[in-house]
Each structure stands twice: as C-alpha cells, then as structure tokens.
Image (tube, rainbow, N blue to C red):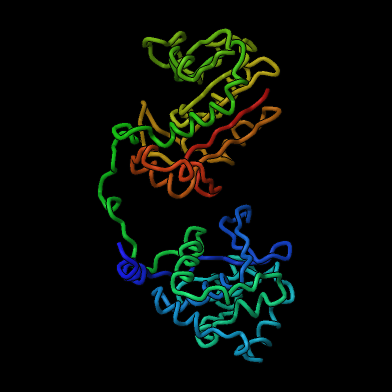
Amino acid sequence: MDQVELRKIIMKKFYVPSALLTVKDSQVVAIFDTNRNKTQIIANKSWLIILEIFIHEQSLEAAYQRFQQMDSSLISEHLLNQCKRIRYDLEELLILLAHKTLKISKQGLSGLMSADQHSNFSAISQENPYVLLCLFDQENLIADEQKINTFEDFSQTVEYLETLGLLSPAVNTLDWGDLKRRFPICHKFGFTRGTPVDRYYLDKFISEIRHQVVGSVLEIGGVLLNKEIYQLSVATEYQTLDLVSRPGVTVVGDAHDSTIIMPESLDTVLVFNVLEHCHNPWVVVQNIYSWLRVGGKCFCMVPSAQKLHSLPKDYWRPLPDGMKQLFQDFSESNLHIYGNPLTVLASFMGVAAEELSPQDLDDFHPDYPVATCIAALK
C-alpha cells in the first residue's frame, strides 16, 4: 500500500475525546476509574490541544487543519480571565471532554451531571479552542506543538492518544465486524478455538502461588489429575472434594457441610471456579477456614465476567470487594485481579486467549475484572 492510499484510509477516521481530566501532584492527569487509581499523565501541550480540537472536529483531516491554525498568541484576555476564576484549586476540578462538550465541575462526577453545579465551556471552546491551555497554563507541560509539522506526525499522535484511551471512534462510526452478532463466537467459553480467557488467568494465578501450595491439600471441585496439571510438586497429600462421585474425586460431599472434613486438618485449600455455584458461598468459606490449620492458606478464583454456566446452578459473580468480604475472617488476604475491557468482551463472546496478544491479556483495568483471585492466610 502506497502513502496516497494509506492517507486516504487514515483521513476517513473520525474521533471524539473520551476523557476526564484533573490535576494530581501538580501534573495534569486523565482518570479512568472512580477511585482515581488508574491515571494517565498528560505531559504534552499538543495532547491538550488535540483533545480540545476533537471536541468540535471529528474527522482527522479537519482536526489537522484546525491544529495548523492554532496560535496561542490569539488567546483572548476574556478567556484567560474566565479560566483564572475557576482554576484556583485545580485538584478540586474535574473536566469532562466529550462530543461537543467541555464541562468543568468542582463537585466531581455528580457536579457534571447537575446543570447548576458545573461550568459549561463547550460554546466558548468552539470559538476559542484554548480552554485547556488556559486552565493548565501554570502546569509543567512540554511545549511540543511546534514539532508536529506534518499530517503524518499529527495522525501518529492521534493514534497514540487513542491507544491511551483518550480518544475514541466518533459516535456511529464503530466497526463492530465479527462481534455484531446474536450469538457468541464460541458457546463453550472459547474452548472450540483455544484456551478460554479465564483459564489463561487461572494459569497465571497458579504460577504466582504454586510454591505456596504445600502439605496436605484439598481441591474443591477438582480431580487428582490437577495436581500434575498445576505442577504442584510441593504438595505432599492431595485430596479432591465434589458433590458427585467421578474418577479423580476422593471425597464426595457438599462443601456447605462442615463435617465432611476434619477441623484443622489441612495446610492448603484450592477453590477454582466453584464459589459462584455455591448457594451460600460465605458458609463454604467459613468451613474452609475451620478445615485449615493455623498458618494454612486458601487460594480461590471466581469469574467476574463470564457467561452463565449452571453446574448445577450458577448463583454469583463475586467482585473484588465481595471477595475481601467473604474472606474477612482470615488474618491476611491478597487479591490478584485480572482483566480489562477487551478481555471482558472476549470472555463473554468466547474468544480464545490465543486470539489476543500477551499485552492484550495482561493489561489491567481495575473497573473491568474478568477473574478475581485471592490468597488468604488463616
């Protein structure tokens, strides 16, 4: 493909900003979660300029033309004064950038939703797209806008901002492709295509805790062969518990029944993809606590984003806070959370792990867990 054809394809792309900005520790940041734990530093002036341009211009070519016309010397005194009145404590401000929208709130997200608790700079920005530069004129930003001299430079920066989650396809321009369908890609979690996404995360969790699976081990919902599959070479004794008798099950019974295992007889309990099938998972966790010796550990995984699978029933999708609550009686607990928006979609649609890159799978977003795991110490 030559440069002319490439340029034609690029010029057909349309974007809108999708960002919440604030200041944290004297740096401009975009925030991606309600707790402000996942952020992206906005270090460059060019980023702010481009984000504000795309509020009003959706096509890549039109945005570049406007970028070429930008001249900070044209910032009006009126705009500067308006921004000064609200910027006295930027760490209190939350700035929403969206399609045709630039709103500034001192009351967080609730202020952005209420008409009388935010300042609407959308129309002002349309006429003078320098609002962000004025708001952040005292922050230590890299003045790099003069280095973007060509359409190719501009498009590369735009594509990078898209990978950071600051720009997204314009409304009604999404290319759904193979995902626009009534049925999943695979009805069996992705098994017909390769490794299900949650199994990839289970393998990752096991690799992180394998050396801690020691002594007398009970796996709830598993079979004896799993000891070899999980490579649990340090375990000296391996029992398995399930509701029904089948090859590889050593104890038949209900994990809700505390009497099926002797109290304080185990060093390790494994519970992978089981608690969602327990009508009272808090009872099962309490039983596990009673079965463990002091100093014993429980390693548990539950799906947070997965299709229903009734074996025999499917009751719950415990989330990270729910897992902490379930294991609150343990002296220590550490969460291992895996997933991001892409792998949530892949999990629900039955896309296999092999169809994603390691970076796709390992990138983490706290608001989009696919699998929630916990390591708990009695």
The residue that appears at 54% across and 15% down in the rendered structure is 218
Name the side, left or right, on which 40 lies relative to 251: right
- Whole-percent x and y of residue 245? 38, 11
Locate the C terminus and report the quarter of the image it occupies. Answer: top right
Name the side, left or right, on which 43 lies relative to 370: right
The residue that appears at 51% across and 63% down in the rendered structure is 161
- Whole-percent x and y of residue 252? 44, 11
Between 255 and 333, the residue placed more toward the observer is 333
Figure check: 89 above or below 299: below
Between 233 and 260, the residue placed more toward the observer is 233
The residue that appears at 65% across and 80% down in the rendered structure is 134
Figure check: 13 above or below 163: below
Residue with the most extreme left position? 182
The residue that appears at 70% across and 19% down in the rendered structure is 295
Query: Picture quarter containing residue 94?
Result: bottom right
Figure check: 317 above or below 264: below
Between 100 and 233, the residue placed more toward the observer is 233
Name the side, left or right, on which 32 lies relative to 162: right
Residue with the most extreme front position? 2
- Whole-percent x and y of residue 290? 63, 18
- Whole-percent x and y of residue 16? 44, 70
Locate the N terminus and report the quarter of the image it occupies. Answer: bottom left
Query: Picture quarter containing residue 113?
Result: bottom right
Q: How many marks?
A: 0
Query: Picture quarter containing residue 109?
Result: bottom right
Name the side, left or right, on which 119 lies relative to 340: right
Between 348 and 288, the residue placed more toward the observer is 348
